[in-house]
Image (cartoon, rainbow, N blue to C red):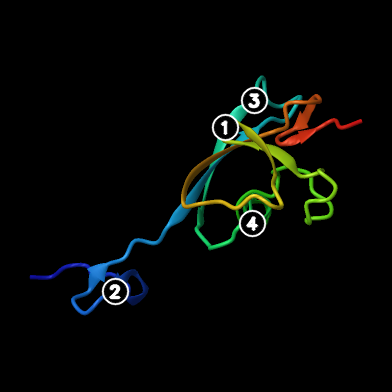
């Protein structure tokens, strides 16, 4: 009886058991003044990589899936605070905070007016 064979990179073990690749689902606040009536959520999936920071994930989404995503970063070393976002309800430095497989909600910092997406007026 015919069937669909899984690609080799999705099979593991001696008997071809399925190995699911871990993913990260990012739920990002999106907002473009003048175009959007209110903030809304954009959902993006990335393959999980060990030691991936929130900043790295945002940069990958921007580079690979949606180059309209707006967010701030500068030193990428945890010194300046420019990359602060709210991750699952908690303010974090996106350049130092590691992601785990599963779902993560990323919102703009609570201080300052939202200029676009995850970018706020820090002046």
Which residue is situated farthest in the top direction here? 37
Q: What label sits on residue 12 in the rendered view?
A: 2
Distance from the alpha carbon under mark 4 to that under mark 3: 22 Å
Residue 21 percent across, percent down from the top left: 39, 61
From the image, which quarter does the N terminus lie in? bottom left
Residue toward you, 5 or 104: 104
Report, in whole angstroms, how far the alpha carbon at label 4 lies from the one at label 2.
28 Å
Q: Which residue is located at x 76 percent, y 45 percent? A: 83
Counting from the top left corner in percent of width and height, residue 18 is at: 26, 66
Q: Which residue is mark 4?
A: 60
Which is more foreground, mark 2 or mark 1? 2
Above or below: residue 85 compared with residue 94: above
Dot 2 and dot 1 residues touching (CB under 8 Å)? no
Disc 4 to disc 2: CB gap under 8 Å: no
The answer to which of marks 4 and 3 sits earlier in the sequence is 3
User: In terms of sequence position, does the residue under pointer 4 or pointer 2 come before the other?
Assistant: 2
Q: Position of residue 109 (x, y in %)?
A: 73, 32
The quadrant of the image that shows the C terminus is: top right
User: Mark 1 = which residue?
Assistant: 41
* Rendered residue at 64%/56% (across/down): 60
Give me the C-alpha separation between circle 2 and circle 1.
35 Å
Q: Quadrant of residue 32?
A: top right
Q: Are marks 2 and 3 in contact (CB under 8 Å)?
A: no
């Amino acid at each position: 009886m015919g069937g669909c064979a899984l690609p080799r990179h999705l099979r593991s073990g001696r008997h071809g058991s399925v190995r699911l690749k871990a993913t990260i689902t990012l739920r990002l606040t999106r907002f473009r003044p003048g175009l959007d009536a209110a903030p809304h959520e954009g959902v993006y999936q990335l393959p999980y990589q060990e030691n991936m920071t929130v900043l790295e994930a945002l940069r990958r989404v921007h580079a690979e899936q949606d180059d309209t995503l707006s967010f701030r970063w500068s030193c990428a070393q945890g010194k300046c605070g420019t990359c602060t976002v709210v991750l699952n309800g908690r303010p974090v430095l996106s350049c130092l905070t590691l992601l785990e497989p599963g779902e993560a909600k990323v919102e703009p910092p609570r201080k300052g007016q939202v200029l676009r997406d995850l970018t706020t007026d820090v002046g």
